[in-house]
Amino acid sequence: MNDRGMLSVDFLAGFTIFILALIMVINMVPGIMIGLESQNIDYDAVAYRTAVILVEDPGWPANPPWELEDEYHKDDIARLGLAVSDNTPNVLSRSKIERFFNTSFFTEEEYGQKVIFADMPYAPYAYNIALRIEGDPVDHTPLGDPVPERSYGYIRRLVKVKGLHSADVDCNNSIYHKTVSENTSVTNTYFTILLNYTELYDKSIGDEYRMDMRTEPMEVTIHNFKSNLNTTDVLDVFINNIRFYKEGVLGEIPFAYDDFDNESYIYKVNGTAKPLDYNFSIKNVDDIYLKLNPPLPFAYETDTVLMVNMSLRYYYEEGQWNTSKDYMDGTIYYTYDTSANSPMNLPTLTPGVLEVSVW
Amino acid sequence: MVNDQAQMYTLEGFAAGVLMLITAYLVLGTTTVYTPGDVHIADMQLEQLGSDALAMMDTPDYYGDTSKLENIILGQSYSHAWFYANFTESLKRITESTDTCVNDLQYNASVYYRTDSGEVASYPLSSSIRSDLVSREPAVRVTRWVSVDADTANIPGIPAADQRDPQLLLVEVLLWRG
């Protein structure tokens, strides 16, 4: 017997260790690859999730909506969604967009917490959120950093942006012209803006077309006042004040009429801002503009009728008591009426695109 | 006569057996099926884009207005050109924040409807297929239910006997890169 053709135990042990080590190394290679691959998938998923939150969700809190929260209550905002409501995916709210792209209101960390949902501050994502609205004069600077050259997670969503509603009252329109032949030198008249919330919150009208006074401003502009004034008869005309009334309730609604903070309303006469209490001559005034910021008084009571009364006082020539006297008067119905005589500009949807990149 | 010819030494044989078994186990264990990670993500993006484009074409710009998609279906001989213009314009819309967007997309759109006898039939609505096409990428399918209020009950593409008012149609678009 000899030991030819036989392996020594030392060699076998060494070879075994070597083979085991080799197999373990080979075994680790796909693991390394999977690590690389999964990161890329993760970014696409984050971008997709972010876009879904922005485009299909109205954010939280929803009632009152998050975009009405001020600087001191910013922490109450849990989620930043841009959709008009849960029922209107891809239709975005203009006021939510303005607040969302306001980088002086939200910090980078807050975007990370409230829309990207990164593990802040330990694992922040870099991101770029860009919105373009067709033919829109407002340029929304993309949020975040410039998109890198290397790979990143990406999604593009097509959207429509709900515009604001307003009323343009033209004094040329004969429905606001009244004539009186009384022996009087003074006439008090009212321009009343009437908002019937039952009509405005009509459930048969989709959220994307609805005029919602809880979240959207009311805007009324009275045009061509001076050019329609009968200056041969009228000595002067004063606007006494603007007051709010609720149908069925006596007396005006308590409101900070003398307040001049631009938070609850903007009232401009020929482009100059005034408080609602202001009493002045509008004989030489052409445009009167009133914007009530949301939520409007009683906007959460769906059966309320709100009246915004603009009280005018006309002074006529003393010697012409027997001639007819022109004045402006009437009710501006803030409704969905789009007939020829209606002053309403209903909300329209403008196409746009939202792109989210995450890396 | 006992000798050790053709016999295995116990320790070496055992070690070699273990070695072979471990090797086989590990080799089988390390077998991975390679799936290209990007493909389904790209499909998801394309599907979302197509779905959004159809949804936005089916959302009227004004209260009480008819949607573009409905107008296109009722659009007589203009159906193909209108759909092509609106759909491709939607697909190409970007913010200019990213310039690496690949927008070479092709589509084939059909409309499905229920016939008078209850069967489902279809007719072609529009297509961007080039005549020199020899092969194509895998397509994704996006659909949209459209309710067409045809007062005159005249939807081009549907035989007169199968017209209803209102008619519920399924617009199906196959979408691919290429």
Image (tube, coloured by chain):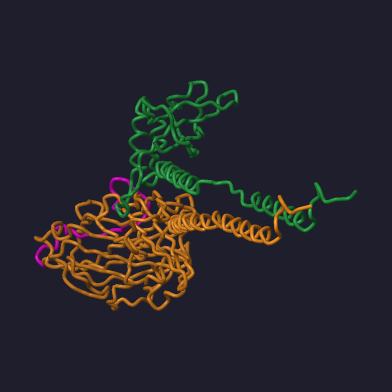
Viewed as shown, does residue A232 lie left or right of A243? left
In the image shown, does B3 or A19 lie closer to the viewer? Answer: B3
Q: How many marks?
A: 0
In the image shown, does B65 or A87 lie closer to the viewer? Answer: A87
The chain drawn green is chain what?
B
Q: Is residue B55 visible?
A: yes
Q: Residue at x 21, y 71 (%)?
A: A273
The chain drawn orange is chain what?
A
Magenta region, residue range: A318-343
Q: Residue at x 33, y 49 (%)?
A: B100
Instruction: State the image coordinates of residue A352 (x, y, percent, origin top left).
Output: 34, 50
Viewed as shown, does residue A5 lie left or right of A179? right
Give the vertical position of A261 relative to B71 (above or below): below
In the image shown, does A62 or A97 lie closer to the viewer? Answer: A97
Instruction: State the image coordinates of residue A269 (x, y, percent, origin top left).
Output: 19, 67
Instruction: State the image coordinates of residue A131 (x, y, percent, origin top left).
Output: 34, 56
Viewed as shown, does residue A279 lie left or right of B115? left
Residue A341 belongs to magenta span: yes
Instruction: State the image coordinates of residue A158 (x, y, percent, origin top left).
Output: 39, 48
> Outermost residue, right direction?
B1
Residue B97 belongs to magenta span: no
In the image shown, does A241 or A256 lie closer to the viewer? Answer: A256
Q: Is residue A333 visible?
A: no
Which of the 4 image quadrants contains residue B178? top left
> Outermost residue, front direction?
A1
